[in-house]
Amino acid sequence: MSDTDLVEIKAKARKAAFVRRKAAFDARPPSVAGPLSGVLAGYRGVPIAGYMPIRTEIDPLPAMAEAAAYGPVGVPVITGMGQPLKFSRWQPEGALRDGPFGAKVPEQDDFFEPEILIVPLVAFDRTGGRLGYGGGFYDRTLERLRAKRATLAIGFAFAAQEAEGLPLEATDQPLDMIVTEQGVLTPA
């Protein structure tokens, strides 16, 4: 398969996944972050990074706010194309500014390295495969962090974002766990 074919296959997979995610977002029940809160309760005090939801992403902020009462919680900051993400400390009521791609970031950067990443995604599969937006930010970041220490990658998504046969590459970093509004999946 050529690189061009893979790009086209990924684009089609993303398009279909965005449709499923939008439908799930529109029909979302209250408290979608409940299962994520339950998982994070088992890691009190461990440095965590979540994300500021954009568009139709499932919202991790309630779970992140609970975790922030026990230890550092951060959000990703894009420093440049082709670069791994950095994570700046976030507080539930902290001042924010506009960051790249429409996501808010803390007004003042206070960078740290998380040991757990709550990862947004477009689609996932039961083997821990993840289809992101195509920039490779989380793959580069997880590769860098995992080279230093064990780093837990928790995909957070609507159950409707599950897909089969995702077009994955050798550089794609696997998820260790997927949490949806319906519960927790541990990859096979």
Image (cartoon, helix red, strand yellow):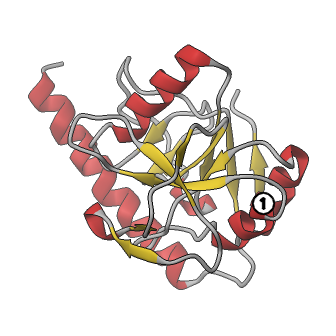
Above or below 121: residue 176 = above
Please tell me which residue lies in front, 63 or 55.
63
Q: Quadrant of the C terminus?
A: top right
Question: 18 left or right of 45?
Answer: left
* Image point (58%, 83%), residue name: 27
Q: Work out whether residue 165 can be spotted.
A: yes
* Image point (27%, 42%), residue name: 135
Residue 74 x, y percent position in the rendering: 58, 54
Question: 42 left or right of 156?
Answer: right
Q: Work out whether residue 181 can be spotted.
A: no
Residue 11 x, y percent position in the rendering: 22, 48
Please tell me which residue lies in front, 56 or 117.
117
Residue 150 x, y percent position in the rendering: 68, 22
Give the labeled residue for mark 1: 67
How many marks can you see?
1
Residue 5 x, y percent position in the rendering: 14, 30
Above or below 143: residue 60 = below
Q: Quadrant of the N terminus?
A: top left
Q: Quadrant of residue 36?
A: bottom right
Please tell me which residue lies in front, 163 or 185.
185
Question: 67 left or right of 54?
Answer: right
- Please tell me how crowded label 1 is: few (under 14), some (14-19), or many (20+) other residues with Cα within 10 Å: many
Q: Amino acid at mark 1?
A: Ala
* Image point (39%, 52%), residue name: 77
Circle 1: element type = helix
Above or below 50: residue 131 = above
Question: 148 left or right of 62?
Answer: left
* Image point (23%, 39%), residue name: 9
